């Protein structure tokens, strides 16, 4: 028959076990990483998410001393890759490149096999970009106010494109409709590139797009820029006003791109990864590459980023509910 340990002895044993566990975790973190890492990008290769991930992966590899490989697992508006990452071993060797689309998905989909705020720990916000309101050059508008008047005068014959139902471009268009009292018709596509092609071809007239996706077309004169979301003009397009300068200052949505690991990843590993990312993003060469894409480098720490993600899920939830969009 086993004799129960006295209370003080039980506490001592528990403390010893906790110390041993902590010591083992710290030792493992000190040796981490011992093999290549992978970043799951839940969208197709070549897009802004993929390019930003690959740019940061190179700088991480230099600082961690191991290859950081990008794997594209596209599908279901980023949810397929997110589920794969959520189910991965929480050892710091599998990262997820998530975006504001995943914050939107938290409300857009009534049934998800993962939770952005519950199943993941945020490492760092790599970059953010404003949405740029662009129109086909055939549209006789140069300002948001002129575009609103044009849309109201032409009823539901004016179409705005998006990369899919519930994307940032869709919700921004719905918000502009509401603020302007217009009735533009939403035309969802299976990706931003298809939407952009039809916008330039004149099949649709208007689009809120991530600035990097349309910067070259604007610079070439194939699309007319109207305004960028947010409070400030963008350095890549200094002559294009911010929505804060217009009659619609509430148009302030931005897309962001951040790295995550499964929530159960040991804290020392989370800290080491976060530091490698933020140090890399402070490198002027990395910053120049991101700015060349039209993206604004961020590089915050994991605690600040996690708080930001929680706020983003709540903020996008309001816009999703106002739009009435669902994707189940």
Image: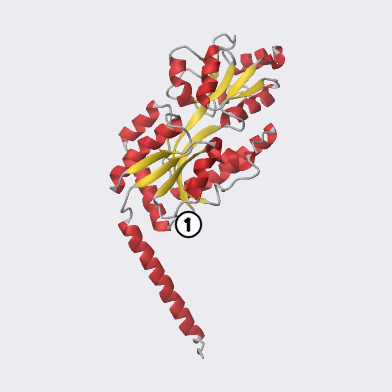
Residue at which label 1 appears: 264
Q: Quadrant of the C terminus?
A: top right
Q: Residue at x 42, y 22 (%)?
A: 236
Vertical relation: 226 (above or below) 309: above
Q: Residue at x 71, y 22 (%)?
A: 181
Left or right: 325 as drawn, with respect to 120? right
Q: Quadrant of residue 159?
A: top right
Circle 1 Cα neighbour tier, 10 Å, few/some/many (<14 / 14–19 / ≥20): some
Q: Secondary structure at mark 1?
A: loop
Q: Position of residue 93 (x, y in %)?
A: 39, 50
Using the image as rendered, state which of residue 71 and residue 10 is in the foreground.
71
Q: Is residue 241 above or below residue 268?
A: above
Asked if 321 appears above or below 31 in the picture, the reply is above
Residue drawn where x is 40% and y is 52% of the image: 92
Measuring from the top left, give residue 215's x and y in whole percent: 45, 21
Determine whether, in the image, residue 257 is placed left or right of residue 276: right
Is residue 214 visible in this depiction of the protein? Answer: yes
The one nearer the camera, 125 or 166, is 166
Q: Is residue 250 visible?
A: no
Q: According to the image, what is the colour scheme of the structure?
A: secondary structure
> How far across and down, in percent of the image, does residue 175 sit?
65, 28
Within the image, what quadrant is residue 249 found in?
A: top right
> What residue is rendered at 51% in x and 87% in y?
4
x, y percent for residue 35:
32, 51
Q: How many marks?
A: 1
């Amino acid at each position: 028959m086993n004799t129960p340990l006295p209370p003080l002895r039980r506490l001592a044993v528990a403390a010893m076990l906790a110390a041993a566990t902590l010591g083992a975790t710290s030792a493992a973190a000190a040796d981490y990483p011992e093999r290549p890492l992978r970043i799951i990008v839940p969208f197709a290769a070549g897009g802004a998410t993929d390019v930003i991930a690959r740019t940061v992966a190179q700088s991480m590899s230099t600082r961690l001393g191991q290859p950081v490989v990008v794997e594209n697992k596209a599908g279901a508006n980023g949810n397929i890759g997110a589920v794969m990452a959520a189910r991965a071993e929480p050892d710091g060797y599998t990262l997820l490149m998530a975006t504001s689309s995943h914050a939107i998905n938290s409300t857009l989909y009534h049934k998800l096999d993962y939770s952005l705020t519950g199943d993941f720990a945020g490492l760092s916000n790599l970059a953010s970009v404003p949405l740029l309101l662009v129109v086909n050059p055939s549209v006789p508008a140069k300002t948001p106010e002129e575009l609103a008047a044009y849309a109201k005068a032409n009823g539901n014959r004016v179409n705005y494109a998006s990369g899919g139902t519930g994307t940032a471009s869709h919700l921004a268009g719905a918000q502009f409709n509401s603020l302007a009292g217009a009735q533009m018709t939403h035309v969802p596509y299976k990706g931003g590139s298809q939407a952009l092609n039809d916008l330039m071809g004149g099949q649709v007239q208007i689009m809120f797009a991530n600035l990097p996706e349309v910067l070259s077309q604007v610079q070439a004169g194939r699309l007319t820029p109207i305004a960028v979301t947010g409070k400030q003009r963008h350095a890549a397009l200094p002559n294009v006003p911010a929505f804060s300068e217009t009659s619609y200052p509430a148009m302030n949505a931005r897309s962001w791109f951040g790295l995550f690991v499964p929530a159960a990843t040991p804290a020392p590993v989370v800290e080491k990864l976060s530091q490698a990312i933020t140090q890399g993003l402070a490198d002027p060469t990395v910053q120049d590459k991101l700015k060349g894409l039209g993206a604004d480098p961020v590089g915050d720490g994991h605690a600040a980023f996690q708080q930001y993600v929680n706020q983003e899920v709540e903020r996008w939830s309001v816009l999703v509910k106002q739009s009435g969009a669902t994707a189940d």
